[in-house]
Image: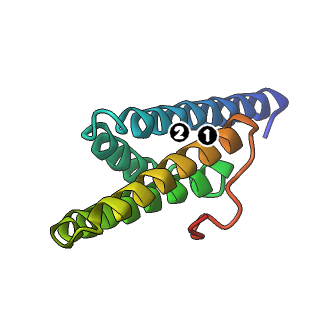
Amino acid sequence: MSEGSTGAVQEATTAQQNSLRTVTMVIYALYGVAIIFGITSIVGVIMAHIKSGDARDTIYASHMSWLIRTFWISFAGGLIGSMLTLVGIGFLVLLAVAIWYIYRIVVGFLKLNDGKPIENPSRLF
């Protein structure tokens, strides 16, 4: 491989990394906006599922996994909390899920902003 083509490969890799960083930031923003307009998290999780393959072997793979798990666990928690409102404890469950969701968005975004992966993205906290 010539010296010029090595530079082009590195430039393409850097461009791909920048693109993944931007997409990941957009997904975190969509999740954040979902606190008020819930539908945007659905767009975010679809984007995360689509981009998770491109993010493989990068720091962004852990963020995609973190984001996907955040959506599905909060979705399940929201359903359970909604059902439990019939017996009076659902509001506490929904509050706990909301706090957990915000925590995950903030932690993930701060790690992304620092250029760090999520350590053990399958953990709950």
Q: Looking at the image, can residue 53 be seen?
A: no
Q: Residue at x 61, y 40 (%)?
A: 109
Label 1 vs 2, first from the N-terminus: 2
Name the side, left or right, on which 43 lies relative to 105. Answer: left
Q: Is residue 71 visible?
A: yes
In the image, is residue 76 above or below residue 12? below
Q: Residue furthest right?
A: 3
Q: Residue at x 28, y 65 (%)?
A: 90
Q: Are marks 1 and 2 in contact (CB under 8 Å)?
A: no
Horizontal and vertical percent for residue 99? Answer: 49, 52
Q: Which dot, 1 or 2, sits closer to the camera?
A: 1
Label 1 element class? helix
Q: Amino acid at mark 2?
A: Thr
Provide residue 73's location: percent of width, then percent of height. 39, 65
Residue with the mark numbered 1:
109
Q: Quadrant of residue 56?
A: bottom right
Q: In this figure, what is the number of numbered marks?
A: 2
> Residue 10, position in %: x, y?
74, 34
Q: Which residue is label 2 attached to?
A: 24
Snapshot quadrant of residue 57: bottom right
Point 53% across, 39% down: residue:
24
Quarter of the figure with the N terminus: top right
Q: Nearer the viewer, residue 37 or 81?
A: 81
Residue type pointed to by label 1: Phe
Q: Residue at x 32, y 33 (%)?
A: 36
Between the residue at mark 1 and the residue at mark 2, the CA separation in whole angstroms equals 9 Å
